[in-house]
Image (tube, rainbow, N blue to C red):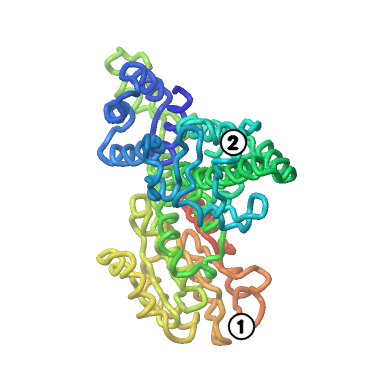
Amino acid sequence: MDRTLVDFVKVLRTAEIKVSPAETLDAMECMDLVGYENREFLKNSLALVLAKNPEEKEAFEDCFERFFVMDKPAQPGNTSSSEDESGGEDEFDDGDFNAEGESQQSGKGGGQGGGQGAGEQEIDDSVPQLQPTSELGKLLTTGTRTEQTISMMEAGRKVEVSKIVVFTQKGLFTRKIMDAMGLKGLQDEISDLTAHGGPGQRNLSGRLKKSRDLLRERVRDYVEKQFFLHADETGKQLREELLKKVKLSSLEKRNFKDVQEVVFKMAKKLISVHSKRRKTYKRGQLDVRKTLRNNMQYDGMFFNLKWKASKVDRPKVMCICDVSGSVSNYSRFLLMFLYSLAEVLPKVRSFAFSSDLGEVTKLFQHSKLEEAMARTMRDYGNGSTDYGRMLQDFKNHVMDDVDNKTTIIILGDARNNYGDSKSEIVKEMYDKAKRVIWLNPEPKSSWTVGDAEMKKYAPCCHQTEVCNSLVHLERVVSNLLKSVS
C-alpha cells in the first residue's frame, strides 16, 4: 500500500497540490492507523494530512475518487444482465464467461473461433469443457474479477503506465499491459486450439477469444483513466512548451486563451525573480555615518558594518506597437506581457499605431485585458502602415517626456510602404533615452528586403532583436528587468 500511496501523491502533485516528503510520510502513518477497509474514512483522514486549503481539498477529492476506483465484482446469480457498471463489460462468474449482451461488441473484428463469428459462438454443453493451459487463460476463465484487476494494475506498474503523456499513446500502453499480463502465451494457445479443430478445442478457443477481447476493453479503459490522472497536467505542460516556441503569427484564435495563460505564468515567474527591492551594494566603500550610528550601543566597537548602497529606480518604459494586420499578434502579447508585470514595471506607457500614433495606457488600466486589446486593434489597426507618421506624432506629443531613465521599446516589422522613414527622430530618441530597443518579428534576412527600413533604424537603436515567439518576448522582458536591477 505504501507504493500505491506514493503513486497517489504523484497524482496530487500533477494536480498542482503541493505535497512535501514529510507530508507523504505522515500520510503513510495515517493509512497505517486508519486502515483501508472504510473508504470514506480513509479519504477524510488523508484529506486532513495532504490538503491545506479549500481549493486543494476540492482537487484532492476529485483525485481520490478517480485514483481509488475499482470495478465492482460480479453479483452471484446475475448472469443474464446485459448492462453493468463498466459500460458493457460482462462479469466472470465461477469460471464461465458470460457472453450475453456482449456478443456484438466481441464480434466487431470479424469471424473468430473455428469458422464461426466470435459474437455468435455458442457453448455446447454436450462438448467436453477443456481448461486453458496459459497463465492468462487460467486467469480469465477461473480467476475472479478482483484478481484480474490486480493483475492488470501490476502490469500497468511494470510498464510504467503513469508516464503516459499524450492520448495517442493509449493503444501503445494497452498493448504493453496485455503483453505483461501474458498475451503471447494466450495467443499461442488460441492458435494451437484452432489448428486442432476439434469441438472441445473450438469451444475453448471461442471462450478465450471473447475473454481476451473483453480484457482488452477493460485495459483500454484503465489506460484512459491513467491518462487523465497522470498525463493531464503533463500534456498541458507539453502544449505550453510548444506554444512558447511557435510563431505568434501562426497562432489560431482558439489558442489565444492558452497562450494568455502561458504569458501570465511567464510574467509571474519574472515577477518572483525581480520583485525584490533593488540595490547595488558597493563593497569596499564603508558608510561611516551609518556604521557609527548603528554601533553606538557597543561603545564604538564596530560589530555591524554598513556599506554604501545606491537605490536603482524602477524603469520608465514606453512601448510603441505596430498593430497593423501583419504584426498585430506580436503586439497583443507584448502588451499583455508588460501589463502582467505591473508590480515591477509600474511606469509603462503604451502606444499603438498603423499610421497615426495613439496612447492606450488608460484604456488598459480601466478595461479588461481582452476588451482593451479588441478596442486597440479596432481603433488603431486599420489603415496603411506609416512609420514616418508615427515617429512624427511621437516627437510632437511624447518626446518631451523622454529622459535618461526611459526605455523605449518599438515592436514592428519596419515596413513603411516606401514612405519617408523619419529615421532622424529615432536618432533623437537614442540621444535622449536610456535605451531604445527595436523588436522585429521578421527574420534578419528580411530586414533589408522590399520596403523594410531596418537598415536605417537599426543604427539608431541600442538593441535590435528578432522577436516572433513567447520565448523571445520573455527573454527581452527579462533582460529589460535585469538591466535595471
Query: Which mark is on residue 221?
Result: none
Q: In this view, does 39 lie to the left or right of 387?
A: left
Q: Is mark 2 on a helix, strand or loop?
A: loop
Q: Residue 129 carries which label?
A: 2
Q: Is residue 181 visible?
A: no
Q: Name the residue nearer the viewer: 56 or 300.
A: 56
Q: Report the Cα–Cα distance between label 2 and label 1.
A: 85 Å
| Badge count | 2
Say which residue appears at 46% left-offset and 28% top-offset: 4
The residue positioned 45% from the left and 22% from the top of the image is 2
Residue 383 point in image, percent of width and height? 44, 86
Which residue is under mark 1?
A: 451
* Residue drawn where x is 36% and y is 17% of the image: 32
What type is the residue that disc 1 sits on? Asp
Viewer-proximal residue among 216 and 28: 216
Image coordinates of residue 101 in percent, x first then y, are 44, 52
At mark 1, the secondary structure is: loop
Q: Kindly indicate whether the residue at mark 1 contacts the one at mark 2 (C-beta within 8 angstroms).
A: no
Between 393 and 53, the one lying in front of the other is 53
Badge 2 crowding class, 10 Å Cα cut-off, few under 14, some 14 to 19, many 20 or more, is some
Q: Where is residue 310 in the image (x, y as percent from the top left)?
A: 40, 40
| Quadrant of the snapshot with the C terminus | top left
